[in-house]
Image (spheres, rainbow, N blue to C red):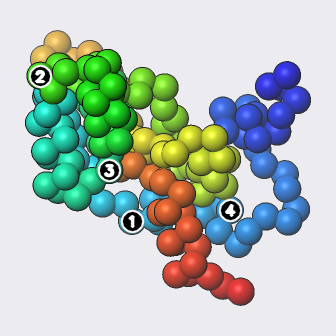
Amino acid sequence: SKFLNDKWMIKNGFLNDVQEHRPWWWNIKVQKLNLSAPLILLPEVSCQKAIEILQEKGYDQAPVVAESGLILGMVTLSNTLTSVLAGNAQFSDPVTKVIYDQFSKISLEDSLGKLSCILENDHFAIVVHEQMQFNGNGSSFTKQMVFGVATAMDLLTFASRNDKK
C-alpha cells in the first residue's frame, strides 16, 4: 500500500521526513538550485517546430503551458522523435499529442529531500511558484507559474559543488 511507503508519503506531502542519516543538503530549499528559467511551449506548437526549438536552444525537454497558465505537461525531445518515427504522431500534429501529462510539481519552498524522493521515480519535477492574481471585479485566484524544471543532474551538481564533507 502507498500509505505504508514513507517515500510516497513524503513525496505527496503526507509525512515529514524523519530519517536520521540524511545528507547535509536534505532540508535546503529547492530555490537554492538556482535553476534557469525554462523554455515554455504553447500547446499549438507542432511536433516539428518543438523538435527544432529544443535542438536549437539545447534543451532536452520543455513544459507545455496553455495561455491561461495551466500546466498541461512536459514534452521531451526523445519522446517526440520516437512518437513521430513510430508513426504515433505526425510532424504537423500539435505537441500536446506527445506530452507527458503525468508529472510531479514542487515549489521553491520545498526541500531538496522532497525533490530527491520525487526523482527516485520521475525523470524531472516541474518547479512552480504560486501567484495571487486579481481580476477587475476584485476577486482573486491563485495561478501557478513554471519557475523551472529540476532533474537529478541539477540535484547532483548542487550536492557536488557544495559538498560540505
Judged left or right of residue 141, residue 103 is: right
- At 68% from the left and 62% from the top, the residue drawn is 26
In which quadrant is the N terminus drawn?
A: top right
Task: Report how far apart the C-alphas of labels 3 and 1 lie in the structure.
Answer: 18 Å
Label whose residue precedes the other's in the sequence (2 or 4): 4
- Disc 2 marks a residue whose amino acid type is Ser
According to the picture, the residue beneath numbered tag 4 turns out to be 26
Calculate the distance from the C-alpha at mark 2 to the C-alpha at mark 4: 44 Å
Disc sitting over residue 18 in the figure: none
Counting residues from the start of the chain, the first of labels 1 and 2 encountered is 1
Q: Which residue is under mark 2?
A: 92
Q: Which mark is residue 34?
A: 1
How far is the residue under mark 3 from the one under mark 2?
Answer: 20 Å
Q: Position of residue 20 (x, y in %)?
A: 88, 62
Residue 66 horizontal side relative to residue 74, left or right: left
Quick one: 68 or 159, which is closer to the camera? Answer: 159
**Structural crowding at the residue carrying mark 3, measured as other residues with C-alpha within 10 Å and reported as few (<14), some (14–19) or many (≥20):** few
Label 4: few (<14), some (14–19) or many (≥20) C-alpha neighbours in 10 Å: some
- The CA distance from mark 4 to mark 3 is 27 Å
